[in-house]
Protein backbone atom coordinates (compact mmCIF):
# COMPACT_ATOMS: atom_id res chain seq x y z
CA UNK A 1 0.00 0.00 0.00
CA UNK A 2 1.43 3.36 -1.04
CA UNK A 3 1.33 6.48 1.10
CA UNK A 4 -1.61 7.97 -0.77
CA UNK A 5 -3.75 4.87 -0.17
CA UNK A 6 -2.80 4.83 3.52
CA UNK A 7 -3.74 8.51 3.84
CA UNK A 8 -7.16 7.88 2.30
CA UNK A 9 -7.78 4.90 4.60
CA UNK A 10 -7.11 7.16 7.56
CA UNK A 11 -9.12 10.24 6.55
CA UNK A 12 -12.05 8.18 5.27
CA UNK A 13 -12.30 6.36 8.61
CA UNK A 14 -11.69 3.00 6.97
CA UNK A 15 -8.70 2.55 9.27
CA UNK A 16 -10.44 1.94 12.59
CA UNK A 17 -7.28 1.22 14.57
CA UNK A 18 -6.15 3.30 17.55
CA UNK A 19 -3.32 4.70 15.44
CA UNK A 20 -5.84 5.66 12.77
CA UNK A 21 -7.95 7.53 15.33
CA UNK A 22 -4.89 9.34 16.71
CA UNK A 23 -3.83 10.29 13.18
CA UNK A 24 -7.31 11.69 12.39
CA UNK A 25 -7.24 13.80 15.55
CA UNK A 26 -3.82 15.19 14.68
CA UNK A 27 -4.83 15.88 11.09
CA UNK A 28 -8.01 17.57 12.33
CA UNK A 29 -5.92 20.01 14.36
CA UNK A 30 -3.84 20.85 11.27
CA UNK A 31 -7.02 21.25 9.19
CA UNK A 32 -8.27 24.03 11.44
CA UNK A 33 -5.16 26.08 10.71
CA UNK A 34 -5.36 25.35 6.98
CA UNK A 35 -9.05 26.27 6.87
CA UNK A 36 -8.40 29.57 8.62
CA UNK A 37 -5.69 30.52 6.12
CA UNK A 38 -7.82 29.54 3.12
CA UNK A 39 -10.84 31.44 4.45
CA UNK A 40 -8.79 34.62 4.97
CA UNK A 41 -7.33 34.26 1.47
CA UNK A 42 -10.78 33.89 -0.07
CA UNK A 43 -12.08 36.95 1.75
CA UNK A 44 -9.24 38.97 0.24
CA UNK A 45 -10.08 37.82 -3.27
CA UNK A 46 -13.81 38.33 -2.67
CA UNK A 47 -13.10 42.07 -2.39
CA UNK A 48 -11.39 42.04 -5.78
CA UNK A 49 -7.97 42.73 -4.30
CA UNK A 50 -4.99 41.34 -6.25
CA UNK A 51 -7.22 40.13 -9.09
CA UNK A 52 -6.04 40.78 -12.67
CA UNK A 53 -8.39 41.07 -15.66
CA UNK A 54 -6.97 40.55 -19.15
CA UNK A 55 -9.80 41.69 -21.40
CA UNK A 56 -10.78 38.38 -23.03
CA UNK A 57 -13.09 35.62 -21.71
CA UNK A 58 -11.58 33.28 -19.11
CA UNK A 59 -13.24 29.94 -18.32
CA UNK A 60 -11.95 28.12 -15.26
CA UNK A 61 -12.26 24.35 -14.86
CA UNK A 62 -11.53 23.14 -11.36
CA UNK A 63 -12.67 21.18 -8.35
CA UNK A 64 -13.06 21.58 -4.63
CA UNK A 65 -11.37 18.31 -3.67
CA UNK A 66 -7.83 17.05 -4.18
CA UNK A 67 -7.50 14.22 -6.68
CA UNK A 68 -8.82 13.39 -10.11
CA UNK A 69 -12.33 14.49 -11.05
CA UNK A 70 -11.93 14.58 -14.83
CA UNK A 71 -10.56 18.07 -15.42
CA UNK A 72 -8.40 17.05 -18.39
CA UNK A 73 -11.29 15.51 -20.42
CA UNK A 74 -13.45 18.54 -19.57
CA UNK A 75 -10.79 21.04 -20.67
CA UNK A 76 -10.41 19.07 -23.89
CA UNK A 77 -14.20 19.10 -24.42
CA UNK A 78 -14.44 22.86 -23.87
CA UNK A 79 -11.49 23.61 -26.18
CA UNK A 80 -13.05 21.45 -28.90
CA UNK A 81 -16.34 23.35 -28.54
CA UNK A 82 -14.57 26.72 -28.67
CA UNK A 83 -12.55 25.65 -31.71
CA UNK A 84 -15.72 24.58 -33.53
CA UNK A 85 -17.17 28.01 -32.82
CA UNK A 86 -14.15 29.67 -34.46
CA UNK A 87 -12.28 30.73 -31.34
CA UNK A 88 -8.56 30.30 -30.66
CA UNK A 89 -8.34 29.13 -27.05
CA UNK A 90 -5.19 28.78 -24.99
CA UNK A 91 -5.09 26.51 -21.95
CA UNK A 92 -3.39 27.92 -18.87
CA UNK A 93 -1.93 25.16 -16.71
CA UNK A 94 0.09 25.47 -13.53
CA UNK A 95 2.40 22.77 -14.89
CA UNK A 96 2.28 20.43 -11.92
CA UNK A 97 5.42 18.26 -11.75
CA UNK A 98 7.02 20.28 -14.56
CA UNK A 99 10.79 20.69 -14.54
CA UNK A 100 10.37 24.38 -13.74
CA UNK A 101 7.06 26.27 -13.67
CA UNK A 102 8.37 29.40 -11.96
CA UNK A 103 8.13 31.22 -15.31
CA UNK A 104 5.50 30.88 -18.02
CA UNK A 105 6.47 28.54 -20.87
CA UNK A 106 4.63 27.85 -24.13
CA UNK A 107 4.14 24.07 -24.33
CA UNK A 108 2.28 24.03 -27.63
CA UNK A 109 1.35 26.62 -30.22
CA UNK A 110 -1.80 25.98 -32.22
CA UNK A 111 -1.40 22.23 -31.81
CA UNK A 112 2.36 22.06 -32.36
CA UNK A 113 4.18 20.69 -29.30
CA UNK A 114 7.37 22.60 -28.52
CA UNK A 115 8.82 20.80 -25.46
CA UNK A 116 9.35 17.32 -24.03
CA UNK A 117 7.05 15.92 -21.30
CA UNK A 118 9.58 16.38 -18.49
CA UNK A 119 9.61 20.11 -19.22
CA UNK A 120 5.85 20.52 -18.93
CA UNK A 121 4.51 17.84 -16.59
CA UNK A 122 2.23 15.02 -17.70
CA UNK A 123 -1.18 16.72 -17.73
CA UNK A 124 -0.08 19.83 -19.63
CA UNK A 125 1.79 17.73 -22.21
CA UNK A 126 -1.21 15.43 -22.63
CA UNK A 127 -3.45 18.42 -23.29
CA UNK A 128 -0.93 19.70 -25.82
CA UNK A 129 -1.00 16.29 -27.55
CA UNK A 130 -4.77 15.89 -27.73
CA UNK A 131 -5.70 19.49 -28.67
CA UNK A 132 -5.08 19.75 -32.43
CA UNK A 133 -5.49 23.53 -32.77
CA UNK A 134 -5.39 25.03 -29.27
CA UNK A 135 -2.28 26.21 -27.42
CA UNK A 136 -1.03 25.34 -23.93
CA UNK A 137 1.03 27.45 -21.51
CA UNK A 138 2.32 26.45 -18.08
CA UNK A 139 3.37 28.73 -15.22
CA UNK A 140 2.58 29.44 -11.60
CA UNK A 141 1.46 33.00 -12.36
CA UNK A 142 -1.66 32.57 -14.48
CA UNK A 143 -1.93 36.32 -15.10
CA UNK A 144 1.50 36.38 -16.79
CA UNK A 145 0.57 33.25 -18.76
CA UNK A 146 -2.69 34.89 -19.83
CA UNK A 147 -0.93 37.98 -21.16
CA UNK A 148 1.59 35.78 -23.00
CA UNK A 149 -1.28 33.87 -24.59
CA UNK A 150 -2.78 37.11 -25.89
CA UNK A 151 0.45 38.80 -27.00
CA UNK A 152 2.34 35.81 -28.46
CA UNK A 153 -0.34 33.32 -29.45
CA UNK A 154 -3.25 35.52 -30.43
CA UNK A 155 -5.63 33.87 -27.96
CA UNK A 156 -9.16 35.26 -27.93
CA UNK A 157 -10.31 33.14 -24.97
CA UNK A 158 -8.57 31.30 -22.15
CA UNK A 159 -9.34 28.01 -20.41
CA UNK A 160 -7.74 27.75 -17.00
CA UNK A 161 -7.01 24.14 -16.04
CA UNK A 162 -7.41 23.49 -12.31
CA UNK A 163 -8.23 27.13 -11.72
CA UNK A 164 -10.93 27.24 -9.05
CA UNK A 165 -8.53 28.09 -6.22
CA UNK A 166 -6.15 30.16 -8.39
CA UNK A 167 -8.11 33.36 -8.00
CA UNK A 168 -5.55 36.02 -8.90
CA UNK A 169 -6.73 35.86 -12.54
CA UNK A 170 -10.27 37.12 -13.09
CA UNK A 171 -12.51 34.51 -14.66
CA UNK A 172 -15.85 34.97 -16.38
CA UNK A 173 -17.01 31.45 -15.58
CA UNK A 174 -16.16 28.91 -12.88
CA UNK A 175 -16.98 25.31 -13.79
CA UNK A 176 -16.52 23.00 -10.82
CA UNK A 177 -16.24 19.24 -11.27
CA UNK A 178 -17.38 16.92 -8.48
CA UNK A 179 -16.58 13.21 -8.48
CA UNK A 180 -19.80 11.38 -7.63
CA UNK A 181 -17.83 8.55 -6.02
CA UNK A 182 -16.36 10.94 -3.42
CA UNK A 183 -18.14 14.27 -3.78
CA UNK A 184 -17.29 16.08 -0.57
CA UNK A 185 -13.78 14.93 0.33
CA UNK A 186 -14.75 13.12 3.54
CA UNK A 187 -16.31 16.39 4.78
CA UNK A 188 -13.02 17.91 5.95
CA UNK A 189 -10.45 20.25 4.43
CA UNK A 190 -6.87 19.11 3.94
CA UNK A 191 -5.15 17.36 5.57
CA UNK A 192 -8.01 15.82 7.62
CA UNK A 193 -9.98 15.30 4.43
CA UNK A 194 -9.64 16.03 0.73
CA UNK A 195 -11.40 19.40 0.50
CA UNK A 196 -9.15 22.14 -0.86
CA UNK A 197 -11.34 24.73 0.82
CA UNK A 198 -14.59 24.71 2.82
CA UNK A 199 -17.70 23.72 0.86
CA UNK A 200 -18.85 27.34 1.20
CA UNK A 201 -16.48 28.03 -1.71
CA UNK A 202 -18.85 26.26 -4.09
CA UNK A 203 -21.01 29.39 -4.03
CA UNK A 204 -18.52 30.93 -6.48
CA UNK A 205 -19.37 28.27 -9.07
CA UNK A 206 -21.37 29.09 -12.19
CA UNK A 207 -21.86 25.43 -13.14
CA UNK A 208 -21.45 22.14 -11.30
CA UNK A 209 -20.54 19.04 -13.29
CA UNK A 210 -20.96 15.70 -11.56
CA UNK A 211 -18.51 13.19 -13.05
CA UNK A 212 -18.44 9.37 -12.96
CA UNK A 213 -22.14 9.16 -12.05
CA UNK A 214 -22.24 5.68 -13.57
CA UNK A 215 -19.88 4.44 -10.84
CA UNK A 216 -22.41 4.97 -8.04
CA UNK A 217 -26.06 4.00 -7.73
CA UNK A 218 -28.80 6.43 -8.86
CA UNK A 219 -29.93 6.99 -5.28
CA UNK A 220 -26.51 8.29 -4.33
CA UNK A 221 -26.53 10.68 -7.30
CA UNK A 222 -29.95 11.98 -6.23
CA UNK A 223 -28.72 12.62 -2.68
CA UNK A 224 -25.65 14.50 -3.97
CA UNK A 225 -27.77 16.64 -6.30
CA UNK A 226 -30.27 17.44 -3.56
CA UNK A 227 -27.51 18.60 -1.22
CA UNK A 228 -25.90 20.71 -3.95
CA UNK A 229 -29.26 22.21 -4.99
CA UNK A 230 -29.92 23.23 -1.40
CA UNK A 231 -26.49 24.89 -1.16
CA UNK A 232 -26.61 26.39 -4.68
CA UNK A 233 -30.27 26.86 -5.64
CA UNK A 234 -29.54 28.83 -8.83
CA UNK A 235 -26.53 26.92 -10.14
CA UNK A 236 -27.10 24.32 -12.89
CA UNK A 237 -25.92 20.78 -12.14
CA UNK A 238 -24.96 18.44 -14.97
CA UNK A 239 -24.40 14.68 -14.88
CA UNK A 240 -21.55 13.16 -16.88
CA UNK A 241 -19.65 9.93 -17.29
CA UNK A 242 -16.13 9.16 -18.42
CA UNK A 243 -16.65 7.54 -21.80
CA UNK A 244 -13.84 5.52 -23.41
CA UNK A 245 -13.13 6.81 -26.91
CA UNK A 246 -10.29 4.85 -28.50
CA UNK A 247 -7.78 2.11 -27.76
CA UNK A 248 -4.11 2.27 -28.78
CA UNK A 249 -1.00 0.23 -28.37
CA UNK A 250 1.61 2.35 -26.61
CA UNK A 251 3.54 2.73 -29.87
CA UNK A 252 0.42 3.79 -31.77
CA UNK A 253 -0.40 6.35 -29.10
CA UNK A 254 3.14 7.77 -29.06
CA UNK A 255 3.17 8.08 -32.85
CA UNK A 256 -0.24 9.76 -33.03
CA UNK A 257 -1.90 6.96 -34.98
CA UNK A 258 -5.66 6.39 -35.18
CA UNK A 259 -5.82 3.40 -32.87
CA UNK A 260 -8.79 1.06 -32.52
CA UNK A 261 -12.40 1.07 -31.44
CA UNK A 262 -13.33 0.07 -27.88
CA UNK A 263 -13.11 -3.68 -27.50
CA UNK A 264 -9.67 -4.07 -29.01
CA UNK A 265 -7.66 -6.50 -26.90
CA UNK A 266 -10.76 -7.76 -25.12
CA UNK A 267 -9.62 -11.35 -25.59
CA UNK A 268 -6.79 -10.71 -23.12
CA UNK A 269 -6.92 -10.81 -19.33
CA UNK A 270 -5.98 -7.28 -18.29
CA UNK A 271 -3.93 -5.76 -15.49
CA UNK A 272 -4.92 -2.12 -14.93
CA UNK A 273 -1.94 0.12 -14.13
CA UNK A 274 -2.40 3.78 -13.29
CA UNK A 275 -0.82 6.70 -11.49
CA UNK A 276 -4.03 8.67 -11.00
CA UNK A 277 -6.08 9.88 -8.05
CA UNK A 278 -8.58 7.01 -8.19
CA UNK A 279 -7.17 3.76 -9.66
CA UNK A 280 -10.36 1.82 -8.89
CA UNK A 281 -12.30 4.25 -11.06
CA UNK A 282 -10.07 3.30 -13.99
CA UNK A 283 -10.70 -0.39 -13.30
CA UNK A 284 -14.47 0.16 -13.21
CA UNK A 285 -14.28 1.95 -16.55
CA UNK A 286 -12.41 -0.97 -18.10
CA UNK A 287 -14.87 -3.49 -16.69
CA UNK A 288 -17.79 -1.46 -18.04
CA UNK A 289 -16.24 -1.87 -21.49
CA UNK A 290 -16.20 -5.63 -21.12
CA UNK A 291 -12.54 -6.14 -20.21
CA UNK A 292 -11.57 -8.87 -17.76
CA UNK A 293 -9.42 -7.07 -15.18
CA UNK A 294 -7.46 -9.63 -13.15
CA UNK A 295 -5.53 -7.10 -11.07
CA UNK A 296 -5.30 -3.36 -10.36
CA UNK A 297 -1.88 -1.85 -9.70
CA UNK A 298 -2.22 1.72 -8.51
CA UNK A 299 0.55 4.24 -8.01
CA UNK A 300 0.25 7.71 -6.47
CA UNK A 301 -1.35 10.51 -8.48
CA UNK A 302 1.10 12.01 -11.02
CA UNK A 303 3.53 9.19 -10.27
CA UNK A 304 6.94 9.51 -11.90
CA UNK A 305 7.42 6.03 -13.32
CA UNK A 306 10.92 4.60 -13.14
CA UNK A 307 12.70 1.59 -14.61
CA UNK A 308 12.25 -0.15 -11.24
CA UNK A 309 8.50 0.43 -11.54
CA UNK A 310 8.52 -1.27 -14.93
CA UNK A 311 10.15 -4.33 -13.33
CA UNK A 312 7.50 -4.33 -10.58
CA UNK A 313 4.74 -4.02 -13.18
CA UNK A 314 6.12 -7.05 -15.02
CA UNK A 315 6.31 -9.07 -11.78
CA UNK A 316 2.70 -8.25 -10.89
CA UNK A 317 1.50 -9.04 -14.41
CA UNK A 318 3.29 -12.40 -14.29
CA UNK A 319 1.96 -13.21 -10.83
CA UNK A 320 -1.64 -12.52 -11.86
CA UNK A 321 -1.29 -14.16 -15.29
CA UNK A 322 -2.23 -10.96 -17.08
CA UNK A 323 -1.96 -11.12 -20.87
CA UNK A 324 -1.95 -7.34 -21.42
CA UNK A 325 -1.51 -4.14 -19.42
CA UNK A 326 -3.96 -1.26 -19.75
CA UNK A 327 -2.89 2.29 -18.85
CA UNK A 328 -4.34 5.79 -19.00
CA UNK A 329 -3.18 8.47 -21.42
CA UNK A 330 -1.70 10.46 -18.55
CA UNK A 331 0.46 7.50 -17.58
CA UNK A 332 1.33 6.85 -21.23
CA UNK A 333 3.05 10.25 -21.29
CA UNK A 334 5.66 9.05 -18.80
CA UNK A 335 5.83 5.34 -19.57
CA UNK A 336 6.44 6.03 -23.26
CA UNK A 337 9.64 7.84 -22.27
CA UNK A 338 11.16 4.78 -20.57
CA UNK A 339 13.29 2.52 -22.74
CA UNK A 340 12.74 -0.39 -20.36
CA UNK A 341 9.03 -0.44 -21.25
CA UNK A 342 10.10 -1.85 -24.61
CA UNK A 343 11.55 -4.89 -22.84
CA UNK A 344 8.21 -5.99 -21.41
CA UNK A 345 7.12 -9.06 -23.27
CA UNK A 346 3.46 -8.12 -22.90
CA UNK A 347 1.16 -5.74 -24.82
CA UNK A 348 0.78 -2.23 -23.37
CA UNK A 349 -2.62 -0.78 -24.28
CA UNK A 350 -3.64 2.87 -23.79
CA UNK A 351 -7.25 3.87 -23.12
CA UNK A 352 -8.38 7.32 -24.25
CA UNK A 353 -11.27 8.71 -22.21
CA UNK A 354 -13.59 11.61 -22.95
CA UNK A 355 -16.45 13.16 -21.04
CA UNK A 356 -20.07 12.54 -22.01
CA UNK A 357 -23.10 14.45 -20.78
CA UNK A 358 -26.08 12.31 -19.81
CA UNK A 359 -28.30 15.39 -20.18
CA UNK A 360 -28.03 19.13 -20.61
CA UNK A 361 -25.09 19.10 -23.03
CA UNK A 362 -26.62 21.74 -25.31
CA UNK A 363 -27.47 23.96 -22.33
CA UNK A 364 -23.94 23.61 -20.95
CA UNK A 365 -22.43 24.65 -24.29
CA UNK A 366 -24.81 27.57 -24.65
CA UNK A 367 -23.93 28.80 -21.16
CA UNK A 368 -20.18 28.90 -21.84
CA UNK A 369 -19.09 32.52 -21.44
CA UNK A 370 -17.51 33.44 -24.78
Image (cartoon, grey):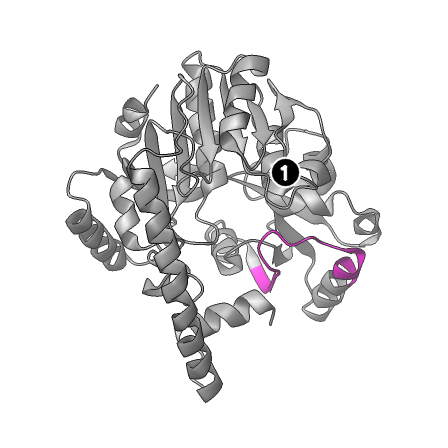
Residue located 36% across and 59% down the image: 35
Q: Pointer 1: what residue?
A: 101
Residue 169 magenta-highlighted? no
Depth check, front residue: 200 or 9: 200
Residue 109 falls in image quadrant = top right
Q: Position of residue 232 (x, y in %)?
A: 19, 45
Where 277 falls versus 151 (above or below)? Answer: below
Residue located 60% across and 72% down the image: 1
Task: For residue 210, say whether it is visible.
Answer: no
Q: Secondary structure at mark 1?
A: loop
State the extent of the magenta-drawn residues as a range.
293-311
Where 160 falls versus 344 (above or below)? Answer: above
Q: Position of residue 180 (x, y in %)?
A: 34, 53
Q: Position of residue 231 (x, y in %)?
A: 19, 50
Task: Please indicate whether residue 76 sits to the left or right of residue 222 in the image.
Answer: right
Residue located 49% across and 49% down the image: 289
Residue 138 falls in image quadrant = top right
Task: For residue 201, say whether it is visible.
Answer: yes
Task: Please indicate whether residue 295 sits to the left or right of residue 7 in the image.
Answer: right
Binning the other alpha carbons within 10 Å of mark 1 as few (below 14), some (14 to 19) or many (20 upward) gives many
Q: How many marks?
A: 1
Task: Please indicate whether residue 210 sits to the left or right of residue 22 in the image.
Answer: left
Q: Position of residue 184 (x, y in %)?
A: 33, 58
State the quadrant of the C terminus: top left
Residue 296 magenta-highlighted? yes
Depth check, front residue: 303 or 268: 303
Residue located 45% across and 44% down the image: 70
Amino acid sequence: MNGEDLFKRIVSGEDTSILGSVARSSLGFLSKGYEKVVTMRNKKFDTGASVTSVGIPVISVGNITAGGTGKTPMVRFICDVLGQKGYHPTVLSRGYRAKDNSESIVISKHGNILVEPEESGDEAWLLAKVLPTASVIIGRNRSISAQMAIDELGADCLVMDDGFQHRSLHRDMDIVLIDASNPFGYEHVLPRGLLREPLEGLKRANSIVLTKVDQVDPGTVAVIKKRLSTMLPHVPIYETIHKPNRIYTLDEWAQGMDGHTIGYGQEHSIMAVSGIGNPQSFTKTLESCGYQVVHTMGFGDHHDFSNDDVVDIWKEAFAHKAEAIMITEKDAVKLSQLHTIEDLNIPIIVLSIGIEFLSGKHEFIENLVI
